[in-house]
Image: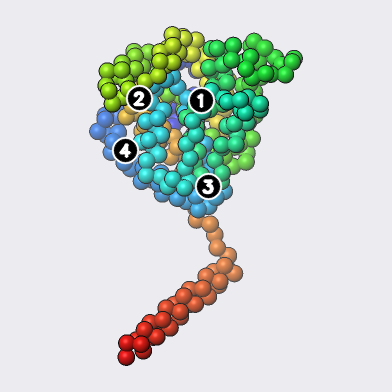
Amino acid sequence: MNLADVLKSKPGKCRLERLDPKFHADLSRESAADLQARQLVELQSLQSLLYAERRNSVLVILQGMDASGKDGIVQHVMSGMNPAGCEVSSFKAPNTSELDHDYLWRCHKRTPPRGCIGIFNRSYYEEVLVVRVHPEFLDGERLPRGTASGKKLWAQRYRQIRDFEQHLVENGTRVVKCFLHISKEEQLDRLLQRIDDPARHWKFDANDVRERGHWDEYQQAFEEMIRETSTDIAPWHVIPADRKWFARVAVASIVLQVLQDIAPRHPEVNEAQRRALKDIRKQLVDSQSESSAKGRKSKG
């Protein structure tokens, strides 16, 4: 089963209530562990080629409710990759400097350079999620007078995001978007675990509980976000997230398919470069031979 295709959301179509957060594609925890081990080997190999070729990059965007498993995805799916070619960015509430720019600015400057994989733990999509659920945040953005409002504002931002992602793709950055679809019951269980387990207290944030009170509003915002911004060149994938082990395998499958589609390879070396390498090799070998000869004479 091709998980990337199964979980892909078609443009203009998304009904979260019809998608099971417990779906696991007939995989068991054990078979998923075996699959993930194989995935990581190929991911490491392809990442190495991507880094060497330096023609393309990959941007992985993770969105979801609090406790949906975004941090775990980063930790497990990207484990073993070369840190030199992989960077994780987390986006909290914008600071004063960021509010002096348009909402895409702070994310655009963190997009991955050629040869690298960038991971956004939350992203510019917060501007059509948190800000939509809490429209009072718009006051702090000091938007120009005459800016669209209400439904027109969100439609405008969806268009801007689609255009931005098209710009990225056309310039060599593949955009991988994963929405971690967790049930309200599973989120409650994970929040309670953070309270009950002293080793997880550091993970607990009272704000997560307050945002849980807006569950239905967020589900509606997520659904519309996916419908309006899932495109052929940058589709959304809805990841069933109630089983952490399945969510990790699913995201790895999607990233792996994108790297396979890019098909990175070692940079080609022209004839002049090959001759130069041959000359340098000869110099290194001759130098080592001379050093060895001098060493023998000194001992004699």
| Disc 4 versus disc 2: nearer the observer | 2
Give the camera-side residue of 277 and 133: 133
Between the C-alphas of marks 4 and 2, the distance is 31 Å
* Residue 8 drawn above or below residue 58: above
Q: Which mark is residue 115?
A: 3
Between the C-alphas of marks 4 and 1, the distance is 33 Å
Between the C-alphas of marks 2 and 1, the distance is 17 Å
Quadrant including the N terminus:
top left
Disc 2 target residue: 202
Which element type, helix, strand or loop, lies under badge 1? Answer: loop
Residue 201, image quadrant: top left
The picture places residue 85, in percent across and down from the top left corner, at: 48, 46
Question: Residue at horizontal 29%, vertical 29%?
Answer: 27
Q: Badge 3 local density, few (<14 within 10 Å), some, or many (20+)?
A: many
Tag 4: amino acid: Leu
Q: Which mark is residue 92?
A: 1
Between the C-alphas of marks 4 and 3, the distance is 25 Å
Question: Residue at horizontal 47%, vertical 51%?
Answer: 49
Q: Badge 1 local density, few (<14 within 10 Å), some, or many (20+)?
A: few
Q: Which mark is residue 35?
A: 4
Farthest-out residue, bottom: 300
Give the camera-side residue of 126 and 32: 126
Which element type, helix, strand or loop, lies under badge 2? Answer: helix
The picture places residue 112, in percent across and down from the top left corner, at: 54, 40
Asked if labels 2 and 3 touch by Cβ distance under 8 angstroms, the answer is no
Q: Reading the chain from its start, which is encountered first: label 4 or label 2?
A: 4
